[in-house]
Amino acid sequence: MKISHSSKKQGSALLAVVLVLAVISSIMSVSTAKISQAAINSTGSNKTTLQAQQYAASEAELMRSMPYSNLSSLAKAKIAGTVFSKEVILGEESSYSSSIKQRPVTVNIYSDAESLPRSTLTFQRYSVEAGDLDIGQPEYLGSGPRTFVAKEAGFVTAGGSSKSQSLTVQVNGKTLGYVCPRGYGTGTISACVPVPKGATVSISGQVDWAYWSKLKA
């Protein structure tokens, strides 16, 4: 049987289409494999970053609980039993106020042999923390109304009020403590208010007693 020239052309064209489709299919298969691998790698990377963030938060909490005088930098070192390393960098100390120092603390967490940290946390530490604050021994101010200027920050505590009079504690003209007049048989009722340094304190009304406690570090 003799095959016409036209049939040969059609066969060649069909073969070319099949070859092109095969090439396209191969390319798509490779692309799909690459996308799948990228997705897997991304999931693994996100998990590693999350773990690094958790280690950074844990180390930062440890540095926050450490006494200010014990703070020190830490060269990059392995975290036992993990693929991570930690590094602590202390910044330059500066004055937060006339009596309080501050310095930045940076915690870096690295994964394997990576040169850049997977997670970084930076926060400030102060030489006087909330837990270091204390109030001095109460100083008796006496009884009866009085006005004074606070030489340092502290608290004023006053007790009183009666059937006909209230007890009022004002700081810079603002009422921060108040006990209303009482016609029942309860004893002295007190009010305690914070006072910033340099503020004017006024205690008025029925004042049975008053005390001052300064804030100290």
Image: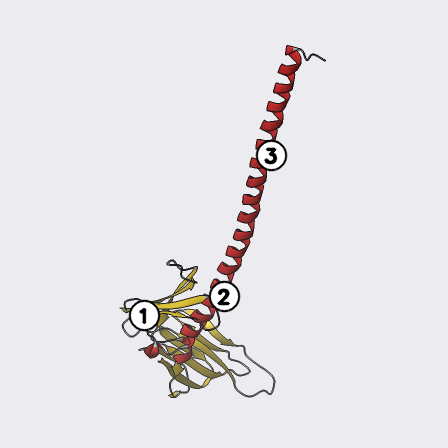
- Is 46 drawn above or below residue 94 in the view shown? above
**Is residue 4 visible in the rendered structure shown here?**
yes
Query: Which residue occupies 55% across, 54% down?
Result: 43
Of circles 1 and 2, the one toward us is: 2
**For mark 3, does the 10 Å Cα neighbourhood hold few (<14), some (14 to 19), or many (20 or more) residues?**
few
Towards the viewer: 208 or 54: 54
Of circles 2 and 3, the one toward us is: 3
Towards the viewer: 192 or 83: 83
Label ID, residue 52: none
In contact (CB < 8 Å): disc 3 and disc 1: no
Residue, disc 2: 54
Report the coloring of the rendering. Answer: secondary structure
**For mark 2, does the 10 Å Cα neighbourhood hold few (<14), some (14 to 19), or many (20 or more) residues?**
some
Residue, disc 3: 25
Between the C-alphas of marks 2 and 3, the distance is 44 Å
Towards the viewer: 205 or 61: 61
Q: Amino acid at mark 2?
A: Gln
Residue, disc 1: 102
User: In terms of secondary structure, where does tag 1 sit?
Assistant: strand
